[in-house]
Image: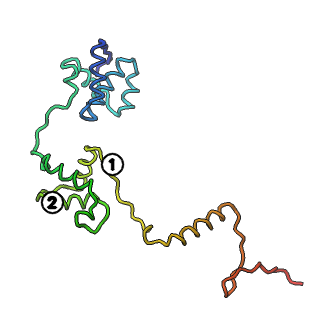
Amino acid sequence: MPASIDISFSSADKKALLQLRRKAPTLRSWNRATALLLLAAGVSVPEILQSLGISRNTLVNWKRRWLRKRHFGLDDAPREGRPARMTPKHVRLLLHAVRRDPRHMGYAFTRWTAPRLAEYLRQRTKVTITPAWISELLRRNGFVWRRTKRTMRNLQNPLATEKAWRALQRLKKGLWRPGLNTSCGSQTEFASSSFP
């Protein structure tokens, strides 16, 4: 394990790293540029390792990549693998569907969920995509995706809900006067429990 991870930058190097951080294509590239800038600024190695959640060897490797290829060494290398199932045309279809109300497309539900979008794409494109990947594609395209909250708000009586809410507020403030309900539904005062 190397004893030191010292590094110094010219002003042009710092400018290139700052630009890479702003336009980093992946979180990994951003982390690499950030770590090197922190090193150059004199931040301690343990602080960098803890804040980025990396090992010392990883930091040393990033420094070596920088010294060999400068900012080109901080980008992810191309990886092998099967071609993507989702073509740009499929992604455009997904984004078009997300922007529209499902009821205008002939569906009975009012909100898209990842499983519903996966099924919609399967029917339209014959390509099977997992709901998790649908969520990731939406995130990459700037959509904030949350799970649907189950609620019965649309089935509630608004007047009864408001009345119950006001009663709860009075109860919280200690303004509720306890009383006994008679068989006709009106309140009476508590009777004294002492006998003459």
- Nearest the viewer among 29 and 7 is 29
Displayed quadrant of residue 193: bottom right
**Residue at image x 12%, y 56%?**
127
Q: How many marks?
A: 2
Please report whichever mark, 1 or 2, sits nearer to the chain's N-terminal start. 2
Mark 1 crowdedness (10 Å alpha carbons): few <14, some 14-19, many ≥20: few
Question: Badge 1 is on which residue?
Answer: 144
Please provide percent x and percent y for residue 117: 23, 58
Do residues under tags 1 and 2 come within 8 Å of each other at their CB atoms? no
* Residue 122, disc: 2
**Residue at image x 25%, y 67%?**
107
**Residue at image x 23%, y 52%?**
134
> Is residue 39 positioned above or below 135 on the image?
above
Mark 1: secondary structure:
loop
> Is residue 45 positioned above or below 167 on the image?
above
- Nearest the viewer among 15 and 133 is 15
Mark 2: secondary structure:
helix
Mark 2 crowdedness (10 Å alpha carbons): few <14, some 14-19, many ≥20: some
The residue furthest top is: 10
